[in-house]
Image (tube, rainbow, N blue to C red):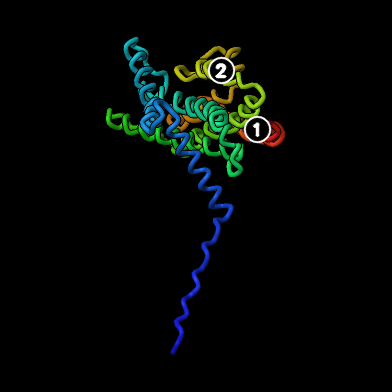
Amino acid sequence: MTAHVQPLRSRPQPPNHLDVYLRVLSALMLRDMRSRFGGNYWGYLVQVLWPCAHLGIITGVMAFRGMNPPIIGDTALFVATGALPALAFQYISREVMKGYMIHKPLTYFPQVKKFDTVIARCLVEIVSSFLGLMLVLMVLICFGIDPVPKDIFQAVTGYLAAIGLGIGVGFINVGICSIFPGWILGYILVTLSLYLTSGVYFVASFMPDEIYYYMKWNPITQIIEWIRLGYEPSYAVQIDYLYIFGWIFGALTIGLIMERFIVRAQQ
């Protein structure tokens, strides 16, 4: 008689560190999307739709008051070139900080690190920014407005600069709010002031030279001019690209240092 030998079943391999890390990030991102307005995914849709609603309100107000755009030629497109980069910076720099505070209790699990909560919120906000941008472009096309810039590279790199600056400042905000949680409310006033004074609804270079000199120290002002230069190549403005990149990489470096020596030190 021949004995039947059953093959040995291979033991399942434990997931590697990369698989675990990606699962943690995806879980944090899904939790981020559900933790918005109403506690479900419809709340995330509200955030994506908000830039479009914001643009419609401001455009309607300017049209009602008979205000013509000084450059570009279309009111909605002029507002979009200023509001979209400003809102991208504002949302990312603020929501990264809020995401860290919301997910902080999850860091008691050994698989979840504080740095993971920040990265997950950054990814969600980057996707949200581009979804909002695509939606605004589609709405402009539906109204018969051509949203394609004359210099696509110029406009796209300017928008990416706004996102990069938002990430860098967001990391700094995480370091600040880990020590002083009240900074979440204080930063709202900072972003509101920047939004109103960055040239979103007006052309900064048309201001008096004494005022424009100080406005140029605001990197958001120069980023808006950067993007508008892609739509209006004849726009007489000088952009200090080195200054903007200095802000982006400087903020990111300071934020990472604060994360390493301040955020991780908090219990």
Label 1 Cα neighbours within 10 Å, binned few <14 / some 14-19 / many ≥20: many
Q: Is residue 154 left or right of residue 64?
A: right
Q: In 3D space, how far apart are the residues under numbered discs 2 and 1 (Cα atoms)?
A: 19 Å
On the image, the x and y values in percent for residue 105 come to 57, 32
- Identify the mark nearer the N-term, 2 or 1: 2
Label 2 Cα neighbours within 10 Å, binned few <14 / some 14-19 / many ≥20: few
Image quadrant in which you'd find residue 180: top right
Going 36% across and 21% down the picture, which residue do you hit? 75
Residue type at tag 2: Leu
Going 52% across and 31% down the picture, which residue do you hit? 162
Instruction: Label 2, secondary structure: give it.
Output: helix
145 or 14: nearer the eye?
Answer: 14
Residue 205 in view of the camera: no
Instruction: Label 1, secondary structure: give it.
Output: helix
On the image, the x and y values in percent for residue 2 come to 44, 88
Image quadrant in which you'd find residue 44: top left
Report the mark closest to the observer, 2 or 1: 2
Instruction: Tell me the quarter of the image containing the C terminus.
Output: top right
Image quadrant in which you'd find residue 232: top left
State the residue position of label 1.
255
Residue type at tag 1: Gly
State the residue position of label 2.
185
On the image, the x and y values in percent for residue 122 come to 53, 36
154 or 51: nearer the eye?
Answer: 51
Q: Which mark is residue 143?
A: none
Q: Is residue 177 left or right of residue 72?
A: right
Mark 2–mark 1 contact, CB under 8 Å?
A: no
Residue 94 in view of the camera: yes
Going 57% across and 19% down the picture, which residue do you hit? 187
On the image, the x and y values in percent for residue 142 come to 27, 31
